[in-house]
């Protein structure tokens, strides 16, 4: 490493919107403003100015047809793309990975710290949710199975490339141990508790989901549960499952599409309860809602067990059934929660805390 400040490469799977991983990347970019950023696909204007102002290097996938809408269709090309990046001249690599970029090839003298959002869901334990026969048809599913099996083998074979793993939750640390046979430090992702905060709005009788509309989120489960509970449901977000979900929705389910952060914050503040029906690796939405003082009903598996305090900041549901969720939603809609206590719990996951912990880890890995 040179005697001057270390040259840092930040690596992220794709930049197509501001989700939980991009919120973490944003704080990392604030802490390392002289870094350069590598990503498979970048849709200009889709992420925050803090991220956009860094030098951004894309892969050959960026030049493929209709990539801004259908980048996920190019998944089989991603391993080749990340291995083609030339990171020579960089002293340190910090990857934020939920797909392939944890397998980037670092320079021999550099160190690589991977902030792992999750090992690839679709290549390991959620193939059927994404590519099962009931999702894409019998023949396409059969065709995708060997592709995903090959991707899983590559993912495992390249799991030794990072020098250190940092997981977003103890749940993800367990997945890293199971699939990669590696140990991981845990640093919880950041929640912008200065932006998400309570106001004087009175809760209204509706449940809220803020989510990408993709299979593992189990939006249909929340729709069925709210219908059973007699509580209207509002759904914020978009994704490939939206047409299917809209076709099966009743009159009390309203799809609002993508909203601004201000619009989402307003809904958090007015909702009786925020619903998290899927098994999450961590889950930023429950903490944004709790920062606004609102309770959460979540499946009692995965990262929600680390972010929702059962009976205090919401309810954890023991099984993924409509009846179990309906019962919890009904109770949450009438329970008198302590708004201040809910807010105080969320403050433990703030942006400053995340930045300090990540910066300390990077400094500890530098020679």
Image (cartoon, helix red, strand yellow):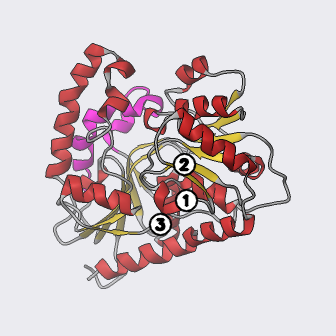
242 is within the stretch colored magenta: no
Tag in front: 2 or 3: 2
Camera-nearest label, 1 or 3: 1
Q: Secondary structure at mark 3?
A: helix
- Say the numbered circle drawn on residue 298: 2
Which sits in the foreground, 76 or 206?
Answer: 206
* Magenta extent: 59-86
Q: Quadrant of residue 325?
A: top right
Q: Which mark is residue 28?
A: 3
Position above or below: 95 against 129: below
Residue found at x 21% / y 47%? 155
Q: Earlier in the sequence, mark 1 or mark 3?
A: 3
Query: For the stretch drawn in magenta, what is the main secondary structure?
Result: helix
Is 272 in front, or is 94? Answer: 272
CA–CA distance in space, label 2 to label 3: 28 Å
Does the magenta portion include 65?
A: yes
Residue underneath mark 1:
308
């Amino acid at each position: 490493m040179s005697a001057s400040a270390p040259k840092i490469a930040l690596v992220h799977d794709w930049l197509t919107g501001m989700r939980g991983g991009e919120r973490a990347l944003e704080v990392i970019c604030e802490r390392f403003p002289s870094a350069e950023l590598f990503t498979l696909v970048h849709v200009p204007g889709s992420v925050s100015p803090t991220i956009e102002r860094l030098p951004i290097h894309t892969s050959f996938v960026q030049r493929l047809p209709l990539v801004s809408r259908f980048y996920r269709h190019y998944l089989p090309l991603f391993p080749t793309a990340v291995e083609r990046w030339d990171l020579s001249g960089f002293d340190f690599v910090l990857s934020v990975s939920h797909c392939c970029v944890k397998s980037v090839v670092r320079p021999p003298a550099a160190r690589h710290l991977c902030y792992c959002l999750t090992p690839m869901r679709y290549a390991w334990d959620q193939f059927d949710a994404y590519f099962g026969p009931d999702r894409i048809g019998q023949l396409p599913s059969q065709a995708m199975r060997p592709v995903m099996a090959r991707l899983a083998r590559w993912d495992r074979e390249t799991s030794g490339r990072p020098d250190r793993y940092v997981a977003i939750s103890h749940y993800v640390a367990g997945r890293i141990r199971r699939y990669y046979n590696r140990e991981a430090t845990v640093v919880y992702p950041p929640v912008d508790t200065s932006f998400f905060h309570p106001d004087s709005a009175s809760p209204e009788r509706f449940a809220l989901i803020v989510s990408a509309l993709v299979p593992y989120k189990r939006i249909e489960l929340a729709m069925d549960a709210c219908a059973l509970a007699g509580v209207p449901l509002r759904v914020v977000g978009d994704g490939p499952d939206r047409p299917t979900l809209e076709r099966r929705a009743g009159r009390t389910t309203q799809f609002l599409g993508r909203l601004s952060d201000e619009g989402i914050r307003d809904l958090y503040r007015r909702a009786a309860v925020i619903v998290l029906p899927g098994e999450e690796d961590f889950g930023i939405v429950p903490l944004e809602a709790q920062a606004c003082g609102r309770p959460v009903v979540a499946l009692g598996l995965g990262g929600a067990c680390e972010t929702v305090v059962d009976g205090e900041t919401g309810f954890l549901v023991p099984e993924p059934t409509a009846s179990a969720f309906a019962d919890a939603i009904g109770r949450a809609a009438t329970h008198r929660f302590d708004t201040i206590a809910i807010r105080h719990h969320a403050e433990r996951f703030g942006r400053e805390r995340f930045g300090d912990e990540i910066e300390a880890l990077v400094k500890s890995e530098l020679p």
